[in-house]
Image: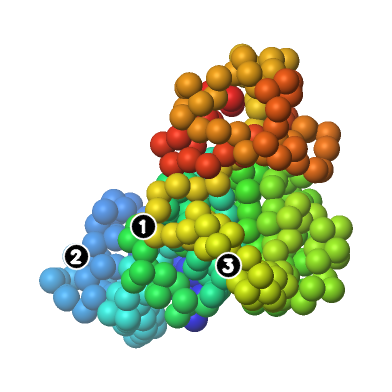
Amino acid sequence: MFDYHDFLKKLQIHILLLGSAFFGGALGFHYFYPDEHWVKLLFMTAITLSTVGYGDVLNVENNPAAAMYTMILMLVGMGIVLYSVSTVTAFFVEGKVGKLLSIQSMRRRARKMNDHYIICGAGKTGVHVIREMIENEKDYIVIENDEEKIAELKKDFTDILVIQGDATSDETLELVNLSGAKGMVATLENDKDNLFLCITARMLNPNLEIVSKAIEFGIVNKLKRAGADYVVCPNFIGGMRIASEILRPNVVNFLDKMLRGKDNSMRVGEVSVGQDSVFINKPLKDVKVYDMCSVNIIAFRKAEQDNFIYNPPPEVVVEMGDTLLFIGSAEQQQRMDKMFS
C-alpha cells in the first residue's frame, strides 16, 4: 500500500541531503576563500560533486588545506549525491511521484468542496451508494484505505474523487472538509469501525447527517447513540425483502423500480422547508405543488415529530423544518429544492 506520509518524508530527506551537500560544500570553500563571490563558490561545489571537472576555478591546488577539503568533499559529497539522486530517480521510475501529485491534487479538490457527501468505505455496500450519488448528480468524496479497491473505483467511475486513508482518523476526516459536509455514509467493513467513525464524525461536526451500515442487528441502537441519525442493517432488510417478495410482490416491484431502476428516472424524493421559504405558515392547498413542479405530496412530517402523515390533507400547514416526500425526476427534485429551500 502506498504510504503518502512515509513517501513524502523520504522525498524530503533526500532533497534535504542534496541541498546540504551542495550548500555545505560551498560554505566550506567560503572558509578557505572568504573574498570569493558565492556564485563562484557554488560553481566550484557543483563541478566537484558532479565530477564534471571544468577546471580549478579557485586554484585549490596551491592551497594544501583547500585541496584536502576538496578531496573529502568529492568522496563524501559525491556519495551523498549518488545515493539521493538514484533514490529520487527510482521514485520517478516506480511512479511514486506521480501518485504523490495525484493525491495532492485530490486533496486540494477535497478541501474546496462544501455541502457535499462523504462516503467512508467503498466495499460492496459503498459502491452502490456511489452509483446513486452519481445518478442524482450529488457532490461526494470517497474515503477508502484499500489500494486495490481504489484502483477498481477509478476503473468503474470516471473522475471519482477518492482519498486513501483511515476514515476513523481525525486527520482524514478534516482532509475531506467534514465541517462543511452535508452528510456522511459509514459503510466500513465491520461494526466496530463504523461505531468509532460515527463518534468521531459527530464530535467534529454536530450538525452532520450520518447514515451508518450495521452488519449485526444488535448494534443498531449503539450506532444511534454514537451519533448516527439513521442505521441500515442489510441482513435485516434482506430478510424483510424476501418476505415481502412473496407476500406483496407488486409493491416490492414498484419500490424496487422507484429506488434502483436504471431505466427509470423517477425517484422518491424529499425536501425540507427552509427558513426563508415563502410557503411557511401556509396550508398545502395554497402551495400548489403540482402546478409548480408537477408532483404530488405522498407524505408529510412535521419538524418536531417522527411519524409521517401519509397522503396529507390540503389543510396541513407548512412550517420551517417540515419534510415533504414526493415522487419525481432529478429535475423535479431540483425545482422542489428551489421552491422550498
Q: 93 or 310: which is nearer to us?
A: 310
Bin the neighbour count of mark 3 within 10 Å (Cα to Cα): few under 14, some 14-19, many 20 and up.
few
Residue nearer the viewer, 331 or 189 = 331
Residue bearing mark 1: 263
Tell me the residue at 81%/43% (across/down).
306
Whichever of callouts 1 and 3 sits on the residue coming sooner in the sequence is 3
Q: Residue 249, which numbered label?
A: 3
Q: Is 113 left, or right, of 75 in this rendering?
A: right
Dot 3 lies on which element?
helix
> Which corner quadrant holds the C terminus?
top right
The x, y position of residue 181, in whole percent, is: 60, 45
Q: Is residue 253 left or right of residue 209?
A: left
Instruction: From this view, report whether residue 153 is shown above or below residue 136.
Output: below
State how far apart marks 2 and 1 are (Cα). Answer: 77 Å
Residue at image coords 70%, 64%: 232
Secondary structure under tag 2 reads loop
Query: Does residue 304 appear in the picture of this structure?
Result: yes
Question: Can you give x and y, in whole percent of width and height, for residue 244 in the image?
Answer: 65, 69
Q: Tag 1: residue type? A: Asp
Residue 168 shows in the view: no
Q: Is residue 212 left or right of residue 159?
A: right
Q: Secondary structure at mark 1?
A: loop
x, y percent for residue 295 = 51, 33
Q: Which residue is labeled 2 in the image?
A: 57
Q: Earlier in the sequence, mark 2 or mark 1?
A: 2
Q: Is residue 212 left or right of residue 217?
A: left
Q: Give the residue drawn at x 61%, y 72%.
A: 245
Residue type at mark 2?
A: Val
Residue depth check, mark 3 versus mark 2: number of the one nearer the observer: 3
Q: Residue farthest to the left?
A: 54
- Which badge, 3 or 2, is on the more N-terminal residue? 2
Distance between mark 3 and mark 2 Cα atoms: 91 Å
